[in-house]
Image: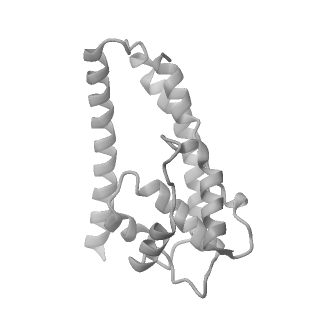
Amino acid sequence: MKNLSELLDDVICDHDITPNDVPMLDLYMDQVLTLFNEGLEQNKRYPQDKLLTKTMINNYSKEKLLLPVKGKKYTRQHIIQMLCIYHLKQTLALADVKALLGRSDVDFEQCFNEFLQNKQHLRRVIPEELASHLEVDLTDPNEVLTFCLSLSAASTYLQRLCQAIIDARAAEQ
């Protein structure tokens, strides 16, 4: 079994589709799915997991998480919005994602590029912050449960912070 440091390295070395990876041409649905499923393949927990499906894209459009689609092609802006949705929906409800993305006054490409820079920074600081905990004995069920509860609490605090920011912004509008 891998130790905690090795598991952390695996988790933090996830793969991203960058705006530079997104073609300048508009794409059909199947091309968007291929871009996501090939570009983010290594982020799957299980090989059969679907990162993006036609149904998901249609639901995002219906719920107005995406800017309106003209015809059957998705623009670079749509694809970057879908990348934002992919990241946000892992911790936020779709209503919260919509509050952030269902807008036409946001430069999604700029935001996503800055996000990727922030993510690189997090890949460096998170292991440093967890260094004191990296001696968890993964064969001891008590230590594993305690550590996972602690990680879950940290995740919950960060999720609640996102929600509080969204709520504060909504209250101002």
Place residue 97 in its image quadrant: bottom left
| Residue at image location 57% in from the left, 73% down from the top | 78
Is 83 drawn above or below residue 39 in the view shown? below
Residue 40: % across, % down? 60, 50
| Residue at image location 32% in from the left, 68% down from the top | 95
Residue 35: % across, % down? 65, 60
Residue 138: % across, % down? 38, 15
Is 82 drawn above or below residue 146 in the view shown? below
In-image side of 81 versus 156 (left or right): right
Where, quadrant-wise, is the C terminus in this rendering? bottom left
Is 8 drawn above or below residue 29 in the view shown? above
Q: How many marks?
A: 0
Pick out the residue farthest to the bottom.
71
In-image side of 117 versus 171 (left or right): right
Is 146 drawn above or below residue 95 in the view shown? above
In-image side of 171 versus 2 (left or right): left
| Residue at image location 55% in from the left, 27% down from the top | 9
In this view, the residue in front, 114 or 26, is 26
| Residue at image location 55% in from the left, 53% down from the top | 115
In this view, the residue in front, 88 or 171, is 88
Residue 12: % across, % down? 54, 35
In-image side of 126 versus 24 (left or right): left
Q: What kind of colouring is applied to the model shown?
A: one colour
